[in-house]
């Protein structure tokens, strides 16, 4: 198991000033999305939302490491990764309002985000097996939290990836908490990365609050995966806020966790300071990026609000080529219920 820690000088990094500015821009964009999404949920615009404040660096760095043809398998907290990868903000907002995911016609190779814990991991390995069968060169990146490593799907996916040498990178954002359960109560292993050894491939830890360190690590992992060597990447970060907007973290954790400062510190503040120290941004850079992100967000909200609500029968439309009788009965019941009961309007 190797470990890469961030905050090297730009001259000692494989990336240049333009790479750093691109990472910081996406960190600002995704932080503003997270803040706006929480505010929208609080006024009833959506039913629930999982904040990711503090995890932008890990997600942005991973997004920038992917090739355009690599497939992303996100979990429910991977919104920053999807946005940095090119998924429109309006698509993610619509999903949170209960609409079908990926309403737009974007061409980003990404699966729908998985809300059940760890269910997307076998899907990513299956896509990797398909790449091998079809002699394709893409890799799959699957994202999950430390809590997902306690699920059977995690172990099954890791075992299949090792046995069949699939082009899969497992990206664990170890944010310290699985809702209210700390990592030390998830596993007796010294780390999550070390678990890869049991399945015959490499695991690596990385400073998940440095986007360039994450990008370097995930790029190397994706290259190895395409060559038939899957990799487990453990990005060490911290969930600064609540598990979801229905959660109160003050009920189960202290304000100052027993973690090193580099892992607890706000990654956006930390990377902004580093960029200034390295001379790759000027004083107005973050303000300009924030203003641009605010404009993008306003447009995304407007787009989401203009999409008509789906009809109840729409959920059956793409489930089967030809609906089985039982599913037809369920569709008819849903339509009849909608016709005889008042529907509600989402608060705009």
Image (cartoon, grey):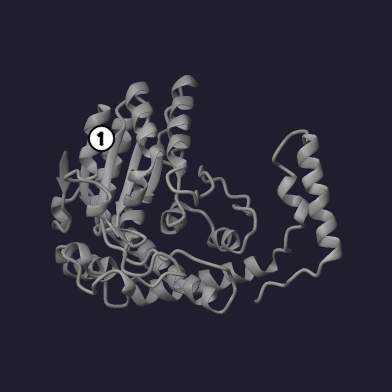
Place of residue 131 in the rendered image (x, y in percent of width and height, measured from the top left)? 46, 26
Which quadrant of the figure has residue 252? bottom left
- The answer to whether residue 137 is above or below residue 260 is above
Q: Is residue 160 left or right of residue 14?
A: right
Within 10 Å of disc 1 (Cα), the crowding (few <14, some 14-19, many 20+) is many
Q: Residue at x 16, y 45 (%)?
A: 190
Q: Quadrant of the C terminus?
A: bottom right
Point out residue 269 in the picture as x, y percentages from the top left corner: 26, 71
Question: In x, y percent, where is residue 147?
Answer: 34, 51
What is the secondary structure assignment of the residue under circle 1?
Answer: helix
Q: Is 36 positioned to the left or the right of 202 in the image?
A: right
Task: Name the residue nearer the viewer: 343 or 292.
Answer: 343
Count how many numbered circles sit on residues in the image: 1
Q: Which residue is mark 1?
A: 196
Q: Residue at x 16, y 38 (%)?
A: 1
Residue 31 in which image quadrant: bottom left
Q: Position of residue 96 (x, y in %)?
A: 56, 62
Residue at image point 79% right, 47% down: 331
| Front in this rendered view, residue 177 or 168 | 177
- Is 199 situated above or below 26? above
Who is closer to the viewer here, 208 or 215?
208
- Residue nearest the observer in this picture, 237 or 259: 259
Q: Is residue 269 left or right of residue 47?
A: left
Q: Determine the image quadrant of residue 192.
A: top left
Q: Residue at point 25% right, 35% down?
A: 196
């Amino acid at each position: 198991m190797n470990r890469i820690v961030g905050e090297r000088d730009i001259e000692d990094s494989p990336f240049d000033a333009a790479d750093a500015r691109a990472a910081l821009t996406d960190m600002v964009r995704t932080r503003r999305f997270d803040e706006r999404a929480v505010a929208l949920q609080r006024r009833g615009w959506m039913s629930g939302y999982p904040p990711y404040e503090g995890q932008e660096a890990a997600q942005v760095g991973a997004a920038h490491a992917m090739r355009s043809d690599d497939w992303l398998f996100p979990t429910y907290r991977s919104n920053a990764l999807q946005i940095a990868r090119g998924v429109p903000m309006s698509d993610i907002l619509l999903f949170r309002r209960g609409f079908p995911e990926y309403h737009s016609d974007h061409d980003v190779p990404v699966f729908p985000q998985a809300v059940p814990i760890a269910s997307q991991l076998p899907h990513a390995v299956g896509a990797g097996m398909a790449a091998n069968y079809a002699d394709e060169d893409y890799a799959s990146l699957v994202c999950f939290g430390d809590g997902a490593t306690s699920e059977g799907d995690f172990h099954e996916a890791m075992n299949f990836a090792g046995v069949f040498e699939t082009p899969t990178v497992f990206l664990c954002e170890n944010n310290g908490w699985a809702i209210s359960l700390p990592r030390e109560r998830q596993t007796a292993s010294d780390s999550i990365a070390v678990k890869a050894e049991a399945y015959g491939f490499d695991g690596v830890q990385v400073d998940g609050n440095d986007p360039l360190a994450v990008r370097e690590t995930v790029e190397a992992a994706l290259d190895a995966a395409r060559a038939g060597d899957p990799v487990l990447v453990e990005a060490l970060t911290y969930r600064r806020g609540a598990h979801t907007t229905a959660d109160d973290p003050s009920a189960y954790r202290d304000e100052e966790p027993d973690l090193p400062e580099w892992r607890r510190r706000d990654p956006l503040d930390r990377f902004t300071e580093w960029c200034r120290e390295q001379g790759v941004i000027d004083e107005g850079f973050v303000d300009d990026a924030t203003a641009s992100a605010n404009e993008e967000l306003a447009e995304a909200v407007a787009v989401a609000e203009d999409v008509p609500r789906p009809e109840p029968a729409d959920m059956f439309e793409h489930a089967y080529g030809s609906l089985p009788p039982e599913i037809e009965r369920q569709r008819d019941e849903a339509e009849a219920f909608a016709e005889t009961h008042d529907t509600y309007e989402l608060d705009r």
